[in-house]
């Protein structure tokens, strides 16, 4: 039986979302929307930077919120929430306001499902996917707010077709070891010998015993 939650979780992976994010920038650049392409790169890059900072802060120094099990924003949720609404918006930019709204709404729903999948597969806590999803939606709607004034975005159908064909092969690509990279960065910056883990919260919060 097909594990739909596993498939949804895979959609938010770096191997799938990174090429999709690049594809959006290429669609905009090919349509000579240079400023929009730059805005997208800056906004998405900024969102990814926030995710990395929260994760490195936890891995290196244990900075997080133990009461809600927040050990860093979910990258899967952030990427999905940032990319899917924007991708549908760009593709439907010239199709009329109703089509654009419907496309953005579909992107938001898909992103939320991916966020839920990360909880179902026990990859993140609820707080981590909620914060990641909200960050991604902030990125998406900030871009859409800037893009609303652009009357027409010419997107090459050939480029879209090539992008979609390329994305079909991304699930077969080896997973990008982003977690390993962040762990190495966190340990280098903090000078600690081992990464901080969720179990360490319980140790540090354990009440003292009097004997």
Image: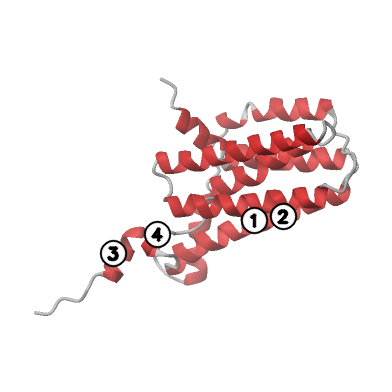
Mark 1–mark 2 Cα distance, whole angstroms, equals 6 Å
Q: Which residue is mark 1?
A: 47
Using the rendered view, name the quadrant where residue 29 is placed. top right
* Mark 1 vs 2: CB contact within 8 A: yes
Could you say which disc has been placed on residue 91 in the image? none
Which residue carries the number 3 mark?
202
Name the residue beneath numbered marker 4: 68
Q: Earlier in the sequence, mark 3 or mark 1?
A: 1
Q: Nearer the viewer, mark 1 or mark 4?
A: 4
Q: Which residue is mark 2?
A: 43
Vertical side of 180 occupied by 110: above or below = above
Q: Earlier in the sequence, mark 3 or mark 2?
A: 2
Left or right of residue 168: residue 174: left
Quadrant of residue 94 in the image? top right
Q: Position of residue 100 (x, y in %)?
A: 76, 36
Quadrant of the drawing holding the C terminus: bottom left
Secondary structure of the residue carrying tag 1 is: helix
Secondary element at tag 3: helix
Q: Earlier in the sequence, mark 4 or mark 2?
A: 2
């Amino acid at each position: 039986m097909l594990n739909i939650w596993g498939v949804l979780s895979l959609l938010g992976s770096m191997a799938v979302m990174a090429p999709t994010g690049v594809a959006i920038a290429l669609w905009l650049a090919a349509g000579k929307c240079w400023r929009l392409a730059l805005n997208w790169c800056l906004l998405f890059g900024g969102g990814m930077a926030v995710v990395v900072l929260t994760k490195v802060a936890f891995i290196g120094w244990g900075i997080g919120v133990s009461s809600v099990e927040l050990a860093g924003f979910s990258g899967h949720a952030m990427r999905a929430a940032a990319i899917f609404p924007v991708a549908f918006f760009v593709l439907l930019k010239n199709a009329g306001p109703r089509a654009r709204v419907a496309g953005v709404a579909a992107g938001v729903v898909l992103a939320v499902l991916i966020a839920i999948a990360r909880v179902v597969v026990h990859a993140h806590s609820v707080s981590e996917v909620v914060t990641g999803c909200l960050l991604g939606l902030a990125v998406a709607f900030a871009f859409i707010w800037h893009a609303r004034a652009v009357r027409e975005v010419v997107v090459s159908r050939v480029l879209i077709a090539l992008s979609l064909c390329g994305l079909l092969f991304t699930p077969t690509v080896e997973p990008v070891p982003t977690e390993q990279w962040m762990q190495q960065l966190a340990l280098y910056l903090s000078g600690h010998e081992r990464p901080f883990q969720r179990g360490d919260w319980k140790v540090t919060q354990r009440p003292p015993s009097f004997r």
